[in-house]
Every structure is written in structure tokens, then in C-alpha cells.
Image (cartoon, coloured by chain):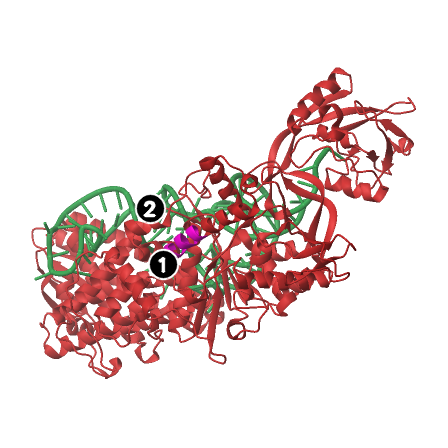
Chain colours: A red, B green
RNA sequence: GCGGGGUUAGCUCAGCUGGUUAGAGCGCUUGCCUUACAAGCAAGAGGUCACUGGUUCGAGUCCAGUACCCCGCACCA
């Protein structure tokens, strides 16, 4: 187990391009991300939310995948047999539309010109192209997926799972075919589920139209936002309790223009307060009207067709576009005196979430999943905490949706997707589902059977992803070893679309939930807070960011900007800051390597060396950092973990520790001290880099390989554990004295404009304990504060004259700067400081005078407050003394 | 209508289980190319934690209400 070391010269500025590709290739070569199906071994598993093969990845994917990669790399380092399973989604409508668009633009052809088979070939080659892109983008990001297990929702295995699940649900009666109102997108030429319709508040009109009573005794006035549907009206409804219209119930009106006589019915659905309190009923074009039609046995007259044009039933308007029809109809109604009035009215209009076309509610025969029985257990597992949302608040959204769920329309009139595995026998009429393509009717053995032409909603296959990718319905090793998964990481925008559906599908087909934790993150917005979208053109390409700043910088940006569940604004400046951090880490490593040239690690435990104060301090801080980072990761709080590391590395490790050990490393404190500093630096840096690895995989691997290390890759390095032996509160406290003294001297120097290069002497008055700390660390204080000499005297020594002074950590500091001292300014400064100290003292005293506080607060807290109070008193006293000297000197 | 989130420094945001002096990045001021890093170093300015009340010894943090902003879901003839 020889420790390896490579001490090639590192460039001054970190260049991500030079290292990223190299290491990813290496990781793949050595199979660093491969999970072995070994039942019994502690494992961690996760499936990726499969990106759509519609196009390239965007920032949202980068965020989602970075979070997952942090988890995967961290768990892997913790020794878990870790599987992060990658793949892509066929994205039915979205992909088909894209390919059709291209076909039209480039060849002027429609999919019908090509035919189903030829068209699908085109889609497959599109899929191949974008799948390749997606994979290479993920590699650029550093995603540590097990590529040997990559899946696609329409590959053989996933397709088999789709059939198995469909047949199971079909045979249990959970999938049925029905004639209902569905959302129809006239542009995409397919049905949509409730979720795929976006309701947009739209300014429209409410037209009041007169329907004359057949018996000539009066009229009914209805109000509608969609007058063209009146051509399909088969009733007018009023509320049964509505006194105004009670007498009309049972009478008939004659539809203007159409001439059809339709009844006035009574139905509870009608809201007497809305419009005129009379509703036209169009069972074929409105979901509520449809239900009323069922209740009252009304005729269904379809007047708008699949192409959004008026049908033959529309009489003289047949063939017109629905909006053109509306215009003409209104004109005609007006001309013939049926239009009572037109009010402006704002209402939500459904739009296709893919193409933004106004959706048409249409009557048609479709396949549905019966949701109530499936939702029940899916609600339970969340309520019982068997599936936990992180942050927890998202479970409310989930539950609300599940509890109010309606049946799921799963048939799509597309070509790209899983063909519905249902066959109809033309001879005996049998309708049956099958996992294997049947050659004959299962009932009458006729070969005259036909498969349903439609395909399934994409989300039907996505819902099976956590187990279809692991081989179900076959009993595979993977399934046994890695299912159910541990965590799912995804955005809040697909909780209903996907997370919810995976949960009920898994409960139904596997008998267990598909995962334990659902980690929800926000979406990425632009710098103005807008959603990134293609139509706004405000999207940012992760690859361009990686090219410019490096993958680690992009990852760190996404991670530090993240608070659980919250959205995140993208600013290039943030990536710049992360890039700077990467460079900081790089240079810390560079510095270390320059000073570790002759260093050889031995097996001795770091705590057993002749440690100096700074060593004990940084080891203690390091050990705290290990603890904190691990704690944050355990809570899926990626952002806090990243920030903890950022601060530790930049401030404590670089600004203080590295600076303080420079004299030692340069040999000015003797060889023994130098050796110890080397050991501590190597130790802390190596393990800090390991802690950072899940966040910034590339730069940490590069650095780690240069540092003395064991093993072939940092990917497999053990995750550092918080070592209690390194915790050292005393060292932290003492180091606090050193740092505060240094800061105070620097402050005086800056205020007095002492040239940075000029070393000046300092006199310090301190009690015995602090005096010892200062004396022991004198060489470092001299260097850090640029002192020519420091004279530590007992606290009661006479005060030096003609000196700028300050109090820090209970130490009175004097810089004799004869000639530089402006007494008046100095007095002013000290007065301000005294005022501030006394203000704090007052608050502190009030607090301690409060009996409730002293009696009820934890002893620790009270003790802390007392100590703080003593320190403040001490400080006030010292500042007062300084002031007294200055002012008395004045009067002399 | 139901539900959720937000309001903290000039900007963008953190702030966990209530506990010393509320943090970061960017921006700003001053001074530095100090042999790891100018993508840097040092020093500094900048905050009524939206408002009102409550719980508590103690509230940015918990509770209730108010205001404004954002987002889901449902309804909308």
C-alpha cells in the first residue's frame, strides 16, 4: 500500500479544460461508477429523472443531475454499493412534434406522407442523435452514472414492463375504455390529460342569447362564452330552486338559427347567481354539460370536429374554423335579434402545454386509468411517512392532488410511443389486452383481430421507470438488489406528472413504494426571475458555461445557490465566483505541493504529533467541517454543505492556516516544526479535498492525485469521518486571541496608513494566560501583522506614550507611531469604541439581571453570557484607560 | 375558492433544534502585484430581519393577524 505522489508543476491558474475530460475518461475506464448487484451488501440506489430526447439539456437538468451526483459520489465514498441509473425518455408528443416540424421544414412533408413505419424510423434516428448529445452533456457535467445500465423508456425491457403493467391493470378493471369529454389539441391532433392542459386567464366575452319558448309564452336568455357551441345545444338548464324560472321547467325552447326544439331542465349544477341563471347545455362540448346530459339523458350533438372546424351538424357553418364560426354566428344572431347583449368577461382558457393551442373539449372514446383505487394506497404511504418529501411541505401538494384525482386519460393519437396492447376481434367483438402480440382472438380464435392504433401517454412508461429499468417484470438481480430505490431527486414541477404516478404504479405492481425520499428542488430562473424558456430565448446552455468556467464552477454555483425546494436565479457573476473558488482551491493545493516536495507521509496518527496551536486549531476546525458537511448531506441540504466547505477552505484554511504556517514551512521555526506543518497541511488538504469531491469532482481528483494518497481514484476514497480526537475547544479559543490581536493591529495600521511593507513594533499588555499564548505564537503574529518586534508585558505595566492603541481579546495593544498619531482623531475613535462597548455592556447586564434568564436558560448559555459580560467589562475598562492617558497627556 | 412560498445589506440570496456581536457572493470605499492565488490580499462602510400583536427568561427563527409579491390546484355557462 505504497502512497503515491506526483509533484509535477501546477499552472498558476486552474484550467478546467486540461483536466475534466481526462478524468472522466479515466473514471469510465476503471469502471468507477459501476454498481455490482450483490444482494446483502449495503447499497444506495437512485434512478435519474430521464431527460426527454426532444433536445439538449438545459440548466434545470444540470441542477437536477448535480444534486444527484453529489448524493451518488458521497454515498459511494461512504462505502455504499451505489447505483445511479441513467437514461432518457421518449417524450411522446414533444418529440413527435419536433420531428414533424423538421420534416415539414426540410422536406415539406407531413408524417402521413411518410407513413407510420417510415416516420417512426425518422423519430428513432432523432432519438439516437439527442440521446448521444445528452449523454455527452452529462459526462461533461461529471455525472457519475452507471452507464452500463443506461435505459430508454421505449427500449425492449421498458416496453415489456409497460405491457405487463397495462395488462395487470386492464385485467383488474383498472383500465377501461370510455366515451367521455376529453381535452383535444387540434394542432397536436391528440388527446391530453388534465395535467397537460394549462389554464390561462383570458379576456373574453359573455354573450347573452335569447332562446324563444316554443309555446310563444316568452323566452329564455342564456349566457355563454362559447356561442358556437349553441349549435350543439340539446337543453337549457336552470337551478331547481330558482323561483324565477321554476315555471319554465319542462317547457321547450327553439334554438335560434338551428331550429331544434330543446327542453328546459332542472339541475343542481346551475349557479343561479352566474349570468342569467340559465345555462345552455352542450353535452358533446363541455365536461359539465356532458354530465348533465348523462343525468337527463340528453342527445349529444358534435358540432366541432377533430380539426377544430365545424362539422356537418353545424349546418350552414359547416367547414368553418371554430373562431370564424363564432364571429359569423354572433353577427347572424345579432342581425336576427337573438343577441341580447355582450359583456366582457375574463375566464381561464385551456391551452396545450406543448404547442399552446386552445384545447377543445371533445366527446371521444379513449382509454382511462381508474384512479380512486390506485390513489388510496398512494395517499397512505405518504401519510405514514413511508415516502417522505424533502422539504416536507411538498407532501401537501401531493396529497391534495391525490385526494382530488380524476381518472387518467392515457390514450394518445400519436405514432411515437408505446402502442396500446389491446386487440379487438372483428368477428366476435372480444376486446383483450396481451403482453405478447397475439395472432388470433383469445376467445374465438379468429385471426381477424386488430390492435388499437393509439399509443400510451408518455408518463405511463415513466411511471414504471424505477423498476422497469431494473428488469421488471422479470425477476432480476438488479431488481432484488437495488429496488426499491432510496432517493428520487426532481423538480417540483413534475410532482403530479411523474412522482405521484410512480408511487401508485409501484404500489400497484410491486407492492412497495418506489423510493423512500423524494428530494424536491426548485427551477432555474433568469436574472430577472423569469422561467427559462425557449420562447423567451432566455435559456442558458450549461455546456457553454462549462466551456467558459468549468464543470466544477457550474456545479458549485448551482449547489451554493440552492436552498431546499427554492427556485434559483442564474447570474453569470455567480459562476464567476465559483470559478474563483475553484482557483482558490487550486492555488492552495499548489502552495501545498510546493512545500511538500521533500515530504513523505508515515503511518503516525496526526493527533500524536508535536502540534502547535495553529495545527490543533485547523484540525479542530477541519473536524467540525467534516461533521457539518456530513450532517447537511444527511438532510439533503446540499447548499449549506457547500457553503460550509467554501467558508472553511477560503477563510480558515487559506486566509489563516496557510498564512500562519508559512514561516514554519520556510524553515524559520526549525526542522521539526516544519515537518509537523507539512503533515498537518497534507492531512487537512487531502481530506478537505475528499469532502469537496462530491461537489467539485474534477478539480478534486486532479489535486488528490498530486497529493500523497492511497488508491486509484478519489471516487473510491473513504468519506472522511469526524474525528473526536481532533476536536480542541481550547485551541479554538486560544487561536481566537491570536486572530483578534492580528486583526486589531491590521486595523490600526490601515487607519493610520502605515505602509503595508513597513514593519512596526508593538507593545501588548496582557494577563499571564494570554501573554503566554501571544509569546508562544509571536513569530506568527509578527508575520501576519507585519511587526518588527512585539513586546508582551504584564497587564499592569505602565502604558506607552505616543502610541495608537486598541483592545482585542482582552489584550491592550499599542503601536508606538510617533509623529503619525493624531491625538484628537485617536480620542474620537476610542470614544466611539467605548460608547459601542458600553451599549453592549448595558444589554448584557440587563440580560444577566433578568432572573428568568439565569434560572431558565441552559447553564451553557448563561455561562457564555457571563463570560461575554466579563470580557466586555474588561474591554470597557481598558478603552477607558487608553482614553484617560490620551486626554491627560493632552492637558500636560 | 383551497393550498403553498416569499418579504433579511445597494443587488441576488443563506440563516438548521429559538440562545453571545444576523452572514455570503456581487457591488461600493481605502490601501496593497506581500515569492499559492490581482480569478488575489488586507482594512472598511452598509441591516428597524415587511408590519401588528402573542408565546417565551430570550424571537430573523415559533404562533395569530395585516399588507404587498410570486406560485400551484379547482371553478368559471
Q: In the structure shown, which secondary structural element does the residue marked by tag 2 occupy?
A: helix
Chain letter behind tag 1: A
Displayed quadrant of residue A474:
bottom right
* Relative vertical location of residue B22 with respect to residue A676 in this rendering, above or below: above
Same subunit: marks 1 and 2: yes
Relative horizontal placement of residue A150, taking residue A461 as reference (left or right): left
Q: Which mark is residue A572?
A: 2
Task: Kindly give the residue lying farthest to the front in the view shown.
Answer: A447
Q: Which residues are magenta?
A: A128-137
Q: Camera-side residue: A823 or A703?
A: A703
User: How many residues crowd around disc 1 within 10 Å: few (fewer than 14), some, or many (20 or more)?
Assistant: some
Indicate left or right for A568 with A354 as reference: left
Residue A892's place in the image compared with A349, above or below, is below
Pointer 1: what residue?
A: A139
* Mark 1 or mark 2, earlier in chain: 1
Q: Is residue A172 left or right of residue A578?
A: right
**Residue furthest to the top:** A335
Majority SS type along the magenta span: helix
Compared to residue A78, the image places residue A237 above or below, namely: above
Tell me where residue A529 appears, x and y as whole percent: 44, 43
* Residue A25 included in the magenta stretch of the image: no
Q: Quadrant of the N terminus of chain A?
A: bottom left
Residue B50 horizontal/vertical position (percent):
48, 45
Q: Secondary structure at mark 1?
A: helix
Amino acid at each position: 500500500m505504497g502512497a503515491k505522489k506526483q509533484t509535477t508543476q501546477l499552472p498558476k491558474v486552474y484550467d478546467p479544460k486540461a483536466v475534466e475530460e481526462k478524468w472522466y475518461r479515466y473514471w469510465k475506464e476503471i469502471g468507477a461508477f459501476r454498481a455490482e448487484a450483490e444482494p446483502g451488501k449495503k447499497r444506495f440506489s437512485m434512478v435519474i429523472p430521464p431527460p426527454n430526447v426532444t433536445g439538449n439539456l438545459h440548466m434545470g437538468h444540470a441542477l437536477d443531475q448535480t444534486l444527484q451526483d453529489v448524493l451518488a459520489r458521497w454515498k459511494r465514498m461512504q462505502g455504499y454499493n451505489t447505483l445511479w441509473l441513467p437514461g432518457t425518455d421518449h417524450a411522446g408528443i414533444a418529440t413527435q412534434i419536433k420531428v414533424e416540424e423538421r420534416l415539414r421544414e426540410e422536406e415539406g412533408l407531413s408524417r402521413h406522407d411518410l407513413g407510420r413505419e417510415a416516420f417512426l424510423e425518422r423519430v428513432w434516428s432523432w432519438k439516437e442523435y439527442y440521446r448521444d448529445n445528452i449523454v455527452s452533456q452529462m459526462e461533461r457535467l461529471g455525472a457519475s452514472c452507471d452507464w452500463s445500465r443506461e435505459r430508454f423508456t421505449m427500449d425492449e425491457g421498458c416496453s415489456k414492463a409497460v405491457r405487463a403493467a397495462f395488462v395487470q391493470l386492464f385485467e383488474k378493471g383498472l383500465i377501461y375504455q370510455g366515451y367521455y369529454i376529453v381535452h383535444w389539441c387540434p394542432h397536436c391532433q391528440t388527446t391530453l390529460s388534465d395535467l397537460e392542459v394549462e389554464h390561462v386567464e383570458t379576456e373574453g366575452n359573455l354573450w347573452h342569447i335569447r332562446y324563444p319558448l316554443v309555446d310563444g309564452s316568452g323566452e329564455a336568455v342564456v349566457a355563454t362564452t362559447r356561442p358556437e357551441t349553441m349549435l350543439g345545444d340539446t337543453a337549457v338548464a336552470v337551478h331547481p330552486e330558482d323561483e324565477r324560472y321554476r315555471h319554465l321547467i319542462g317547457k321547450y325552447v327553439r334554438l335560434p338559427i338551428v331550429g331544434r326544439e330543446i327542453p328546459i331542465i332542472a339541475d343542481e349544477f346551475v349557479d343561479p347567481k352566474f349570468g342569467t341563471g340559465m345555462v345552455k347545455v352542450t353535452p358533446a362540448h363541455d365536461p359539465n354539460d356532458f354530465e348533465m346530459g348523462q343525468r337527463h339523458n340528453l342527445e349529444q350533438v358534435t358540432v366541432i370536429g377533430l380539426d377544430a372546424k365545424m362539422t356537418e351538424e353545424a349546418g350552414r357553418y359547416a367547414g368553418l374554423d371554430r373562431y370564424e364560426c363564432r364571429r359569423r354566428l354572433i353577427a347572424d344572431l345579432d342581425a336576427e335579434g337573438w343577441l341580447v347583449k355582450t359583456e366582457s368577461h375574463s375566464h381561464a382558457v385551456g391551452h396545450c402545454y406543448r404547442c399552446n393551442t386552445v384545447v377543445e373539449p371533445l366527446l371521444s372514446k379513449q382509454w382511462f386509468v381508474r384512479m380512486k383505487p390506485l390513489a388510496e394506497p398512494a395517499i397512505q404511504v405518504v401519510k405514514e411517512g413511508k415516502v417522505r418529501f424533502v422539504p416536507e411541505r411538498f407532501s401537501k401538494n401531493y396529497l391534495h392532488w391525490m385526494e382530488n384525482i380524476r381518472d387518467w386519460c392515457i390514450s394518445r393519437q400519436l405514432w411515437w410511443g408505446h402502442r396500446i396492447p389491446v386487440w379487438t376481434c372483428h368477428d366476435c367483438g372480444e376486446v383483450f389486452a396481451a403482453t405478447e402480440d397475439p395472432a388470433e382472438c383469445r376467445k374465438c380464435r379468429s385471426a381477424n383481430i386488430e390492435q388499437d392504433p393509439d399509443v400510451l401517454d408518455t408518463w405511463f412508461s415513466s411511471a414504471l421507470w424505477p423498476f422497469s429499468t431494473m428488469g421488471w417484470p422479470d425477476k432480476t438481480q438488479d431488481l432484488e438488489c437495488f429496488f426499491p430505490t432510496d432517493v428520487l431527486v426532481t423538480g417540483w414541477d413534475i410532482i403530479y406528472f411523474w412522482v405521484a404516478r410512480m408511487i401508485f404504479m409501484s404500489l400497484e405492481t410491486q407492492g412497495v413504494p418506489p423510493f423512500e425520499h423524494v428530494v424536491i428542488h426548485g427551477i432555474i430562473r433568469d436574472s430577472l426571475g423569469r422561467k427559462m424558456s425557449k420562447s423567451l430565448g432566455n435559456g442558458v446552455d450549461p455546456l457553454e458555461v462549462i466551456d467558459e468556467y468549468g464543470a466544477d464552477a457550474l456545479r458549485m454555483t448551482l449547489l451554493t445557490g440552492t436552498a431546499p425546494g427554492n427556485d434559483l436565479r442564474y447570474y453569470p457573476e455567480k459562476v464567476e465566483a465559483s470559478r474563483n473558488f475553484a482557483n482558490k482551491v487550486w492555488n492552495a493545493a499548489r502552495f501545498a505541493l510546493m512545500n511538500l516536495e521533500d515530504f513523505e507521509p508515515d503511518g503516525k496518527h496526526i493527533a500524536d504529533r508535536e502540534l502547535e496551536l495553529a495545527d490543533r486549531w485547523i484540525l479542530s476546525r477541519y473536524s467540525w467541517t467534516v461533521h457539518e458537511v456530513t450532517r447537511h448531506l444527511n438532510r439533503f441540504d446540499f447548499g449549506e454543505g457547500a457553503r460550509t466547505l467554501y467558508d472553511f477552505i477560503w477563510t480558515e484554511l487559506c486566509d489563516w492556516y496557510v498564512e500562519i504556517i508559512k514561516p514554519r514551512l520556510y524553515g524559520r521555526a526549525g526542522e521539526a516544526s516544519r515537518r509537523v506543518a507539512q503533515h498537518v497541511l497534507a492531512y487537512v488538504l487531502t481530506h478537505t479535498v475528499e469532502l469537496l469531491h462530491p461537489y467539485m469532482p474534477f478539480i478534486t481528483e486532479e489535486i488528490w492525485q498530486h497529493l500523497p494518497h492511497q488508491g486509484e481514484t478519489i471516487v473510491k476514497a473513504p468519506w472522511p469521518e469526524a474525528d473526536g480526537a481532533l476536536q480542541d475547544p481550547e485551541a479554538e479559543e486560544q487561536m481566537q486571541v491570536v486572530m483578534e490581536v492580528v486583526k486589531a493591529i491590521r486595523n490600526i495600521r490601515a487607519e493610520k496608513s502605515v505602509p503595508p511593507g513597513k514593519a512596526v513594533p508593538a507593545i501588548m499588555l496582557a494577563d499571564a494566560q494570554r501573554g503566554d499564548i501571544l509569546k508562544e505564537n509571536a513569530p506568527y503574529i509578527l508575520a501576519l501583522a507585519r511587526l518588527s518586534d512585539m513586546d508582551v508585558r504584564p497587564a499592569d505595566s505602565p502604558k506607552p506614550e505616543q502610541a495608537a492603541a486598541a483592545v482585542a481579546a482582552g489584550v491592550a495593544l499599542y503601536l508606538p507611531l510617533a509623529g503619525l498619531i493624531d491625538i484628537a482623531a485617536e480620542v474620537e475613535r476610542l470614544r466611539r469604541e467605548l460608547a459601542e462597548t458600553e451599549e453592549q455592556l448595558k444589554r448584557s447586564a440587563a440580560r444577566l439581571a433578568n432572573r428568568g434568564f439565569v434560572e431558565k436558560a441552559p447553564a451553557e448559555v448563561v455561562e457564555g453570557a457571563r463570560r461575554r459580560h466579563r470580557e466586555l467589562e474588561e474591554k470597557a475598562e481598558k478603552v477607558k484607560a487608553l482614553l484617560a492617558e490620551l486626554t491627560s497627556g493632552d492637558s500636560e
